[in-house]
Image (spheres, rainbow, N blue to C red):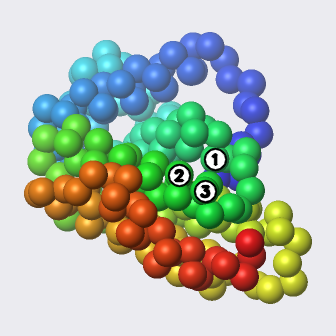
Amino acid sequence: MLPKPKEKLDPRVKRTRSLILQAFSDLLAEKGFESITVQDVTDKAQVNRATFYAHFADKYALLDSFISQLFRQEIEKRTLNACHYTPENLKNLIIAVCEFLSTTHSNCAQPHQQFESLVEGTIKNQIFELLTLWLQQTKTKISTDIPATVATWAIYGLASHYSHHKKRPALETFVDEALPLVAINLEQFA
């Protein structure tokens, strides 16, 4: 979740990209990722295939961009991208991931294993980047790779468990129980 350099994009490029992402979002809700074709997206967005391919290599790159953008917005909304490591910020990150995955699963018509694997990779990368940034800000001489990796997998695994649970406990209760399991890997940086 390292800060992205501000790109100066032509407004038409931004608009076209936005149309493609919105069409993709609508299609995910209607028919699920596996059933979506590039032609479906271009028809819904009212752009041609060449325009689509000027923005995205394929539907997998589109999914990656879509999930990255949504998750980045979730993190920015909570200003976690501007924070440093504290147990409270870690708790808020776990809450954000749980809410994000729960919303993603409920907004996708037919979430299949392939879709979930692609989402998992994208979200784990962003969690890892954010945790690494937080831990490096502590100016520690200890390597941050292993603790950030362990915490990333723990956070994602807990959030996935929560989002798939039929009878979910209250989110706050779940996170209060889960937090010590994640925080123990990061206590050396507090």
Above or below, 134 relative to 92? below
Left or right: where does residue 111 sit relative to residue 181?
left
Q: Is residue 90 above or below residue 147?
A: above
Question: Is 176 above or below relative to 18?
Answer: below
Res. 50 image quadrant: top left
Q: What's the amino acid at mark 1?
A: Leu
Residue beneath the point at 64% across and 40% down: 79
Please tell me whether mark 3 sits on a helix, a strand or a loop. Answer: helix
- The residue at which mark 3 appears reads as 88
Where does the C terminus fall, quadrant-wise? bottom right
Q: Nearer the viewer, residue 176 or 150?
A: 176
Position in image of residue 122 (x %, y %): 46, 58
Which residue does the image show at 30% across and 25% down from the upper left? 23
Is the residue 174 above or below the residue 147 in the image? above
Q: Are marks 2 and 1 in contact (CB under 8 Å)?
A: yes
Mark 2: secondary structure: helix
Q: Earlier in the sequence, mark 2 or mark 1?
A: 1
Position in image of residue 162 (x %, y %):
27, 61
Amino acid at the residue labelled 2: Asn
Residue of label 1: 80
Q: Which residue is mark 2?
A: 92
